[in-house]
Structure formats: C-alpha cells, structure tokens
Amino acid sequence: MAYELIIVGGGKMGAALAEGLLRAERVAPSGLLIVENAREQREALAARLAGVTIVAGLELEHVGPHSGVILCVKPDHAEAAARVAGACGATRLLSVVAGLATARIEAVMPGPVAVVRAMPNTPVLVGRGASAIAGGAHVTSADLEWAEGVLGAVGSVVRVTERNLDAVTGLSGPMPAYLYLVVEALIEAGVHQGLSREVSRQLVVDSFAGSAELLARSGESPEELRAQVTSPGGTTAAGLRVLESRAVRAAFLDAVAAAAERSRQLGR
C-alpha cells in the first residue's frame, strides 16, 4: 500500500510533525506512514498515534507516484535514508536535517527528485514552530507549496534561499535553547531576591509568554515596546544598563554566528 505522507525518523521532530499533521487534518491516519528502526520508539508512537502505520524499514510498496517523504533523521544517517527513499521511488522529499544541503541529497537519488530543505524548531511540539524552507535544483512552486502545507500544520513558514538556511539554523533553530537559558537565569535571579522558586518561575514564564504575544499582536517593534517599559532613571533602565555593560547583546550576536558556522561545517 502506498501512503500519502511518509515520515522517515520517529524521534521528537518526526513525532511532532505527525501529531501536528493529524491534528490539522492535513493527512488522515490511514494515509500516514512512519519509518522508525528503534523498537521501543515504534511502540511509543503506536500508543500515541492511533491508526497510523509504523514500520521498521521503508519498502517499495509504501511509495506511490504522489507520496511525499519527510526526512527527520540525524545528519549522519540522512544520506543513507534518502538513498533508500529514492530507491523506493520517492519523487518529492522534505528534509528537516540540520546542515544537509539539497545537493547532497540529490546526489544519492537515482534520478531527479524535488528536494525541499527546511529548518523548523522545537515549538512545533505545541504547534507554534517557526520554519524556513528552500528548494533544490528540481523543485517547482507546487513543491514549495506542498512543503509549506506540511510545516504550516505545526507553525509558521517562510521561504528563503538555500544559502540563507545556515543563518536560519543559527538563529531560529537554537533560539528555544537561547531563551530557555535566559528563563533559567531569571528564575534564579528571582530566587536570589527572596522569591520562592515556584513564584519566580510563574512570573518569568508568564512574562515571557505575554511579552511574545504582545510583540506578535501589537505591530510595534521590539525597540518601541522596550522603550515603553523603560522610564528614565527607573528600575528597568537600571537593569538594562547592567545587561548592556555585560555585553549581552554582543553575546547573542556571537551565539547566532557560531551556530550558523557550525551548520555550514556540517554541510561540507
């Protein structure tokens, strides 16, 4: 039986995409296949995703002329997995493998295949991911629209050129980790000022969520919103002065640059 969508790799990203696609009714359970070679993970997915077929390996019969394959494996396994997909007849493939250029995937295929490269981030787990996509040598506008439809089920999608995907990987890919580090530090700061850890955590997490929502809805720039909170000579100004003196802004610039460069290294 051929499937409409085939997810190769049932880890966190693959499972999140599967759940998002099913929740958005982008695909029916009977039209989705997940390929995962780890037995324990297959059992966990079967418990979570009723009606979805989960197998240990991709077979020729699974892939039809209209099947789309989503590659969600680790970088060192990606080319081998793509080679199997190509041998089974895949003609359209969406790769969410960090640092892996479309040309490297195209090179292991038996013929021309539409390869779309994407960089989503972990908020896809709650349907609020931010993804960027870029097409390879054989991609049409219809292929990009298909990829947007897939990733749009778990968040927002932007189109970029492939040369900009390393910058995306440095910025939005690790951004949840950057923000979690800031959240950790602020919770600890509240505790140091005498708050309980529970109270400090609630204040920090809710403030982050609310601030992000305000930024998204207001249409104002982050600079404008920051200025609204910062009264001359006030408490916010005092705190920001310390952050600027410790070069926090420069540290974020360097972090994004380092992550982008690592993405380039992985792609070589």
Image (tube, rainbow, N blue to C red):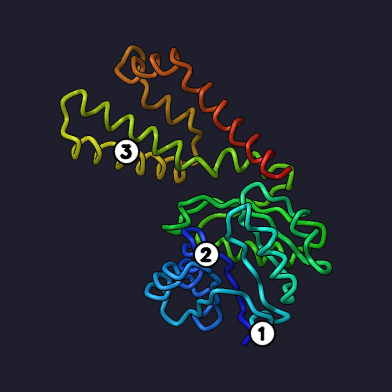
Q: In which quarter of the image is residue 60?
A: bottom right
Q: Which of 155 and 258 is in front in this view?
A: 258
Quarter where residue 92 is shown: bottom right
Task: Tell me if mark 1 has few (under 14), some (14-19) or many (20+) residues whose alpha carbon lies within 10 angstroms of its own.
Answer: few
Residue 223 located left or right of residue 102? left
State which quarter of the image contains the N terminus: bottom right
Of the two numbered discs 3 and 1 in the rendering, the one whose residue sits closer to the viewer: 1
- Camera-near label (2 vs 1) is 1
Q: Which residue is drawn at 61% across and 30% down?
A: 257
Q: In the rendered view, does 37 fall on the left or right side of 58?
A: left
Q: Residue furthest bottom?
A: 1
Query: Distance between the Cα atoms at labels 3 and 1?
Result: 51 Å
Picture layout, residue 8 above or below residue 33: above
Query: Which residue position is annotated with label 3?
Result: 207
Asked if disc 2 and disc 1 are in contact, CB closer than 8 Å, the reply is no
Give residue 21's mark. none
In front here: 148 or 120?
Answer: 120
Residue at point 39%, 39% (across, down): 180
Q: In the rendered structure, are the residues bearing label 2 and label 3 in contact, judged by CB atoms less than 8 Å apart?
A: no
Placement of the C terminus among the 4 image quadrants: top right
In primary-sequence order, the first of circles 3 and 1 is 1
Neighbor class of circle 2 (other Cα within 10 Å; few <14, some 14-19, many 20+) is many
Precedes in sequence: disc 2 or disc 3 = 2
x 44%, y 57%: residue: 125
Rendered location of residue 130, percent (x, y): 53, 50
State the residue position of label 2: 153
CA–CA distance in space, label 2 to label 1: 27 Å
Q: Which amino acid does label 3 sit on?
A: Ser
Query: Which one is earlier in the sequence, the residue at label 2 or at label 1?
Result: 1
Q: Mark 1 points at which residue?
A: 61
Q: Which residue is drawn at 41% across and 79% down?
A: 50
Residue contact between numbered discs 3 and 1, judged by CB atoms under 8 Å: no
